[in-house]
Amino acid sequence: MKSLLIIHYFASILCAQEVKLDLSLRSINPFTGITSNTANAFWGVNGVLQLAALGITPLLVQSGADRETHNYLVNHQSFTPYSTPALAGAVLIPVALGGGLYTYGRMQNSSHEVAAGCAVAQATLLAFSYQTLLKSVTGRAGPRPREMTQDEVADFPFGFMRGGVFWGWPSGHMLTTTAIITSMQTMYPSNRGVQWGGYAYLTYAFASVLVHGKSSMHYLSDAVAGTLMGIAIGRSVGNGFNQKVNPATQTQVQPLLGKASGVQIQIPF
C-alpha cells in the first residue's frame, strides 16, 4: 500500500508539469538536484549523522539497551492504542503535505511552496529507497511481542533478502518521517509551527514505533538509526531546494557613480 501511494504521488506531480506557468517554476520538480542532494546526504555534517547511526547501533545492541527497552515496553503497553495514527502518518504525510504544498504553490505561482512540496517528494523517495536497500542486506528480524534474549536481539543475519524489507534495521517509518519533517524545517527555518510541530510529531512517531503491536515493530537502535539517517537526508534535500529558489550567492553588476569609474561586482553571502 505504501509503495502504491508513493508511486501515485509522483505520477500526479509529474503530470502537473504540463500546466502553463511562470518560467521560474518550470525548472522545479521532485527530481531537481537529486544527484547532488543524494551525495550531500553522506557528506559533511550529514555524513557524520550517517556514521553516528552506524556507530550507535552496536553500542545499543551490545550494551543491552535494545533488549532492556523492548522487554520493559512489552510489559507496559498502555501507550499501544495511540500508536496507529503515527504509523499511518508515514504514508499520509508525504501525500497530504507534499501534494498540498505543491498544488498551492502552482496555483499561487510561488516557487518556495512548489520547492517545499518537491522537497517532501524527493525526501520521501530517497528515504524509502535507502531504507529498502539497507533492510535488504542487514536482515534483522523485528522483535516479538514477548521478552527477548540478548542473542535474539543481536541477530543480524547479513545477506541479500534474508529478512525482507518491511521490518528490521533501520526503522523505515522513522527514516522517512524524519526526512520529510527535517526537509520542511530546513525549508521554513523561521516558522515556529513547523519547527516545534515537527519535533513534537517526531517524538510521538519515535515512541509509536517502539510500542506498536505490543512492541513487535522495532528495537530502540532501529528507531535511533532511522532518525539520524532521516535528519541527514532531510537536511540535504531541504538545503538543495532552498538554494534552488533562494541562491546563497547572487552576483550583482552595476556601474559606479561619482568620482570612481568602472563596474562594481557585489557577491553577498
Image (cartoon, grey):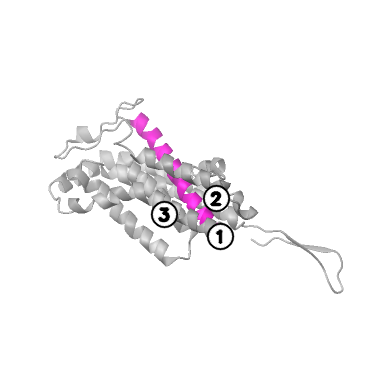
Q: Disc 2 designates what residue?
A: 240
Compared to 192, does 203 lie above or below?
above
Q: Which span is picked out in magenta?
A: 112-138
Give how far apart the Cα atoms at labels 1 and 3 are: 16 Å
Work out whether mark 2 precedes mark 1 in sequence or the reverse, and give the earlier one.
1
Label annotation for residue 97: 3
Q: Quadrant of residue 126?
A: top left
Dot 2 alpha-carbon crowd within 10 angstroms: few under 14, some 14 to 19, many 20 or more: many
| Residue 196 x/y as whole percent | 37, 63
Q: Decide whether the magenta segment is chiefly helix, strand or loop.
A: helix
The residue type indicated by label 2 comes to Gly
Work out whether mark 3 precedes mark 2 in sequence or the reverse, and give the earlier one.
3
| Residue 224 x/y as whole percent | 33, 46
Side (left or right) of 165 relative to 79: right
**Residue occupying image coordinates x 58% and y 54%:** 243
Q: Quadrant of residue 262?
A: bottom right
Q: Disc 1 designates what residue?
A: 110
The residue type indicated by label 3 comes to Leu
Q: Nearer the viewer, residue 111 or 163?
A: 111
Label annotation for residue 41: none
Whether 71 is among the magenta residues is: no
**Residue occupying image coordinates x 20% and y 36%:** 150
Q: Nearer the viewer, residue 125 or 178?
A: 125
Instruction: Give the residue furthest to the bottom.
Output: 258
- Tell me the SS state at disc 2: helix
- Tell me the SS state at disc 1: loop
